[in-house]
Amino acid sequence: KLNCFGSPSKYPTMLIKLHEMPQLPPLEALAQNVLGKSVFVNWPMMHEARVVAVSNETGEIRVGKDKPKVKTFNKVEVDRWATDTQLMTDRYMIGNGIPGAGGVQIGAIQLRIRVLPLQGMKTNLANGATKKLFGTTEADVPIQLALWQAPAPEPRFIEKGPTKLQDRFPVNSSVVLTKGKHRGCKGTVVGIVDEKTVGVKVQIIPPELPFGLAIAQSV
């Protein structure tokens, strides 16, 4: 029975059964088309992630610096992969005591992928280009629970190339200075000076009196 809150459900529960997957290509052939690609995992709230490794019962192929790293499992690692796969199958079907987990009969797991989840976007301060920033902690996911296209594309997570200054800082837009003697002050863009410089009218904040002096003057 489904385990949503730490114990088996006392009432009838419903399971979703996935279609059986066809026989997949060999690990080496599939890795060429999977490693480094983006997938969407964490059903039902799909989250973008980058594939860094793919494995089956015989071994694992992982993203390398120059070329993929191929690892063949020994007897202990083969047994561990089989055990982890069975536990994973049970967890997706029965649940692990956390609301939202369980309720999916995923069938036989032929391949598993290890992914790094998307953490956000990083902006290049020099040219305004944005790039996806992925985490460092890997997640292990059965390949049948990964989508290869976004079910609901998110415009905020679309990478963009360099942007012109007039597009990044349009006239009359508000900015906050992050360097120089006016760091932390708000300002208004008044124009573009050149390809690397923006003209800003700064709202200078008057310096505060020393704390002790302010108290002494108020007495």
Image (spheres, rainbow, N blue to C red):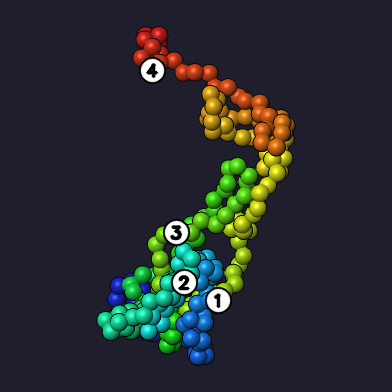
Q: What whole-number distance in Å separates the C-alpha atoms at marks 3 and 4?
A: 43 Å
The quadrant of the image that shows the C terminus is top left
Give neighbour class at mark 1: few <14, some 14-19, many 20+ (Cα, 10 Å).
few
Question: Which x, y percent locates residue 140?
Answer: 40, 72
Name the residue beneath numbered marker 3. 135
Q: What whole-number distance in Å separates the C-alpha atoms at marks 3 and 1?
A: 22 Å
Going by the numbered disc 3, the residue's amino acid type is Gly
Residue depicted at 30% across the width and 82% down the height: 74
User: Measured along the vertical axis of the image, is residue 42 above or below residue 118?
Assistant: below
Q: Element under label 2?
A: loop
Residue depicted at 39% across the width and 62% down the height: 137
Name the residue beneath numbered marker 2. 68
Question: Which x, y percent locates residue 113?
Answer: 45, 75
State which tag comes first along the sequence, 3 or 2.
2
Give neighbour class at mark 3: few <14, some 14-19, many 20+ (Cα, 10 Å).
few
Q: Say which of 65 and 16 sits in front.
A: 65
Answer with left or right where residue 89 lies relative to residue 206. left
Name the residue beneath numbered marker 4. 211
The quadrant of the image that shows the N terminus is bottom left
State which tag comes first along the sequence, 3 or 1.
1
Going by the numbered disc 1, the residue's amino acid type is Asn
Answer with left or right where residue 46 lies relative to residue 109. right
Give the foreground label among 4 and 1: 1
Could you tell me how many numbered marks the image carries?
4
Q: Say which of 117 and 13 sits in front.
A: 117
Q: Quadrant of residue 187?
A: top right
Residue 102 visible within the image: no
Residue 33: image tag = 1
Q: What whole-number distance in Å separates the C-alpha atoms at marks 4 and 2?
A: 61 Å
